[in-house]
Image: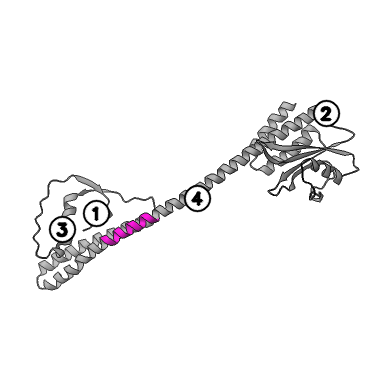
Amino acid sequence: MELTTFVHFSRLVSDSATSEGIFSLLGRTVVEECRASHALVFGTGDTGDFTVLSSYGNSNLNPNTLELDEVCTIAELGTAVVKRIGGTGYLSRVFPLISEAALFGALVVLYSESDPLNERQWIQIEGLTELTAISLNKTYQHQKLQKAFDELRVSQDALIRAEKFRALGQMSAGVAHDLKNFLSPLVMYTDMLRDSAGDREEVLEVAQHVDRILQRGLETVERLRVFSRQSAEQIEAVETDLNQIVKEAIQISKPRLHDIQLVVELGEAPKALIRPADGVSA
């Protein structure tokens, strides 16, 4: 009978999601399975004060009326409870909830003076108390680990955000540099347009260069926008002709060269996978 009670109690305790549920289960099991008259579970606060966490039984005891202000030790709990129901024929016995030197509270068992519990019942109650303390300790350790994990995750998220902002700052500086390199030639190309206003072919050629520069500028801005969005989405890399990128860079820089004669000799370059927004910046 005792073994069945322990197995059933252990299973219920394991399934209980909260400490409050475990306290309630202990009191109910002590009364229903061990035939105690009443069971009260007390917890201890940070200041050492005792509070009633669970009360179960057939006495007329109202736990809310217990005077615990002068109770300083676990041994005094039983006396305080019996004093509250004095003259009714009850006695008490106190079992501390201790596991790995940690005190989680105490169980106060009330029993009839005329019908005391036998030794086997007391041993059973003691075993239930120890199982409860072990379960509470595991719950407490789990909560500590969960708290530490949550704090670590918060710190990790903050570190990731800080690194993201640092990288964003570096990228912004790079994008600003790229945009300056793109926009500067536009001023020179504007002058070229004015100088060649009478030559339609030359105007169209310059306009084509301007259009290409603006496209590169827009791609660079898009690169910054995608990055700042903090999205896992990645722009697909495409096969790119490196020689073509070199030619575009030279063309963008051409207005700066003025009368400088630039000779370009390009070999056969392998194809490379590059995202469009990561292309040339002069």
Callout 4, which amino acid? Answer: Val
Q: CA distance from mark 2 to mark 1?
A: 87 Å
Q: Residues within 10 Å of mark 1 (few under 14, many from 20)?
A: some
Say whether residue 110 is magenta: no
Which residue is disc 1 drawn over?
Answer: 279
Is residue 230 something one can see in this rendering? no
Callout 2, which amino acid? Answer: Asn
Say whether residue 173 is magenta: yes
Element assignment for label 1: loop
Relative side of 141 to 202, left or right: right
Q: Residue visible at 14% across and 70% down?
A: 192
Query: Which circle marks residue 118 in the picture?
Result: 2
Task: Where is residue 107? Give x, y as percent.
Answer: 76, 39
Q: Are marks 1 and 4 in contact (CB under 8 Å)?
A: no
Q: Earlier in the sequence, mark 3 or mark 1?
A: 3
Q: CA distance from mark 3 to mark 1?
A: 13 Å
Residue 6 image-quadrant placement: top right
Q: Earlier in the sequence, mark 1 or mark 4?
A: 4
Q: Are marks 4 and 3 in contact (CB under 8 Å)?
A: no
Q: Nearer the viewer, residue 187 or 58?
A: 187
Q: Are marks 2 and 4 in contact (CB under 8 Å)?
A: no
Which residue is disc 4 drawn over?
Answer: 154
Q: CA distance from mark 4 to mark 3?
A: 48 Å
Q: Residues within 10 Å of mark 3 (few under 14, many from 20)?
A: some
